[in-house]
Image: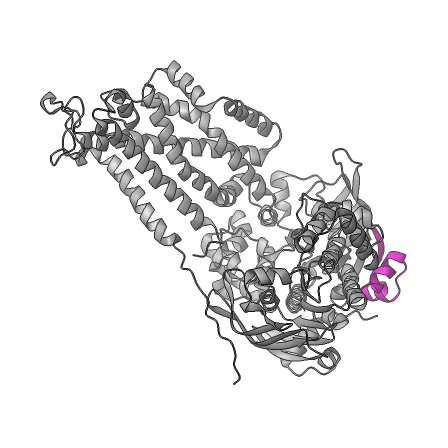
Amino acid sequence: MEELLRYEHVDISYLGVPTVRDVSFTLAPGEILGIVGESGSGKSTLIKAAMGLLGAEGCVTRGDIWYKGKNLPDLPQKELRKLCGPELGYIFQSAGSSFCPIRTVGAQLYETMREHERISKADFEARAMEMLQKLGFENGKRILESYPFELSGGMQQRIGIAAAMLLKPSVLFADEPTSALDVTIQKQVVEEMLLVRKTFGTAVVLVAHNLGVIGAMADRVLVLKDGEAVEYGKTQEVLTNPQADYTKALLAAVPKLRR
Amino acid sequence: MSEVTVRKQKLRKSTVKMRLIIFGTLAVLLVVCSFFSAYLTPYDPYLQNLDIAKQAPSAQHLLGTDRYGRDMLSRVIAGSRASIFSTLLLVAIITALGTAVGVTCGWVGGWVDTVLMRISDVFLAFPGLVFALAVAGSLGGGLQNAIIALAAISWPKYARIARSQTLAQKETQWMKAVRLSGSGTGKIILKHILPNILGPILVTSMLDIGTMMMELAALSFLGLGAKPPIPEWGSMMSDTRSLMTTSPWITFSPGIAIFLSVMIFNLLGDTIRDYADPKSRR
Amino acid sequence: MEPILKAENLTKVFSRQGQEDFTAVNGISFELFPGECLAIIGESGSGKTTAVNMISRLIDATSGQITLNDQDITHLKGKALREVYRTMQMVFQTPTDSFDPRRTLGDGIGESLRNVGVSKAETRKKVEALLEKCGLPKEFARRYPHQVSGGQCQRAAIARALAIEPKLLICDEATSALDVTVQKEIIELLNELRAQQGQSLSILFICHDISQVQQFADRVLVMYHGNIVEAGTPDEVIRTPKNDYTKRLIDSVL
């Protein structure tokens, strides 16, 4: 199967300071890749680089990020913008704060869709309701009419996922989507993302600091330490037979419920 | 190794520190000049000599002479004492007064907050300069009364800023920790609240220097500020309005002095605001 | 043995403009004994943070009684309340927002000591000792909060809480904003401190993840919609939950 995304020997610097060094990995269609590491390991930086979210201070100083034959760091802004949304989706760590607080959820989702395709309000509502229903939301209409602050943290996060999925991207980047949530809601979000993969065949790159969350979802795992990849392989193998000492330490840190 | 793309990162050097030094130095020079103006004037600014009246700028009199033969350059330099010094005093007063009221309102809350804020609303409701004119007029003219008048209408702005900043600091998580350390109200305000709110307040002060200078000059222009023969840029412009077409240097010299001073303080204020912003890389 | 902390029918009702009154905490009662670690588990909105804010007197209770070290602290204010803070201290959720950003960590840690009249020199020595006790180098006294990592900041926050030698330490979601590896380190630090101090230190640990406290807490209370729905040792609650909500809670952990 042809790969969807390929990072080749990627180096990223922030203001001249190297943050990520020589990281390479691939992503096949429909695959879920988990990138795990502590704060400061460069994991968020790694996925921000693909979508051009590094800002003026960040730069991919070496290596390539290939997506469907295009080298993302070298794409002009205009072309990258066309990809962001319909091909590459992004979920922020705290989805609630990525929404504008003074407009309804429906209005914001409509605005996002309009950026990429001409669509009437009626069509949008139909598609949005269909998406929300497929993703397990019970009262789609109420959600579209709500303001972000009227919804709980877990709900906001799941809607962040639905919002990204509206444009049916091939790859979904999720930056610590469960870190700001209660453990019980974490499970809901994890299930949501598995449902997304099952229903739409979307590939997911999931960034987290908790190897337990990754273990529940990912097909393959990349372990990052101080900007460098220390382990990369199938989840089952990495969890049952970790090669690197650091991976072992991460595994030991996950609180397990002894039932 | 196979072909791996290498890219160079474009780093724009931050100019904030350099600008801070330049404008800071210029501002300090202005202030120093205003303090030592008595020693910096090439001629006596009060010395009249009708023989050389209304002379255009020349080698001996760089900015020419006014209708009484007084050296314009000396008048402008001498005028800096009134214009700059008074402005700085005015800004210091409104900052201190406004901050004190604002912090009290923000911290104490309740009816004290309501009463003081309504009082400041009253002051804000008056059209600024008109009210200042009324106060200055009723107190009689003179620079001192002009300062009082302008202070009366300008302090509410600082009170509002200080109040909302104080309220924000009260809600922070670390403020809870400070309360649990057993610190009393006075200590909290002096050691914790003031240092955290002074940043935005000082930037507002700096940016206000220019505005206050203009307002003081305006009051003087309207005859309610410094009284002749005391040189003050605003009144100097007002007295010589009629000479603008025939001897423009007499009206424009103090005008340009106001313009340059206001610009320097405004640029300094902008730069301090940029410097205080953690997002601007320094 | 007398409990160090006793909450009786503690209730908090928030009245909101134009809406019904909201009962955040609905008459909860519990006891904490000297040397014990009691965990309160609950999701966001369960009322656990409100309960703890009442106990630490950061907000007033609507009704009920709080007894700390045999003293009724429910309505204390001002100087009397400041005295109580020599017995009870707290560590908060967001490490980097736990200290005044304009003051050094050393200043923050030593503040409670300076407030009770300890000299500057003596305070400095005690601050250095506390930093070492919490696994930080002495130089950190001169650092500012934004110059250190989240985990380091939280250790400094624990050092600050311990400076005044309190009998009760309240940890309000103290590990929730940290990476899992750092969470483990902080819990290990708290365990060490408990072992060192024995009966003289009791801990009230608030969090949303019951797995974290299975090895750490002596007893667990589960809160839901302002009520305590289950109580027992961690093993009892996890293996034999009696309440439906507790069962759902256990099942929904990854």
Q: Residue at x 58, y 28 (%)?
A: B112
Q: As drawn, which residue projects farthest toward the front?
A: A118
The residue under the point 45% across, 31% down is B97
The answer to whether residue C155 is seen in the rendering is: no
For residue A41: magenta? no
Q: Is residue C222 above or below residue A209?
A: above
Q: Residue furthest bottom?
A: B1
Q: Is residue C100 visible?
A: yes
Is residue C245 one of those drawn in magenta? yes
Q: Position of residue B267 (x, y in %)?
A: 37, 43
Q: Quadrant of residue C204?
A: bottom right
The answer to whether B150 appears left or right of A2 in the picture is left
**Residue B40 placement: quadrant:** top left
Residue A86 coordinates in the image, percent (x, y): 69, 61
* Residue with the most extreme left position: B51
Pick whichever, B153 or A139, lies toward us.
A139
Image spot of residue C239 (x, y percent): 86, 67
Q: How many marks?
A: 0
Identity of the residue drawn at 72% across and 83% down: A241
Q: Which residues are magenta?
A: C225-254
Residue B282 sits in which quadrant?
Answer: bottom left
Residue B199 against residue A69 in the figure, above or below: above
* Color theme of the render: one colour
Q: Nearer the viewer, residue C11 or A209?
A: A209
The percent position of residue C139, horizontal first and vertical second, equals 47, 64
B117 and A19: which one is in front?
Answer: A19
Is C77 in front, or is A163?
Answer: A163
Image position of C144 (left or right of C151): left
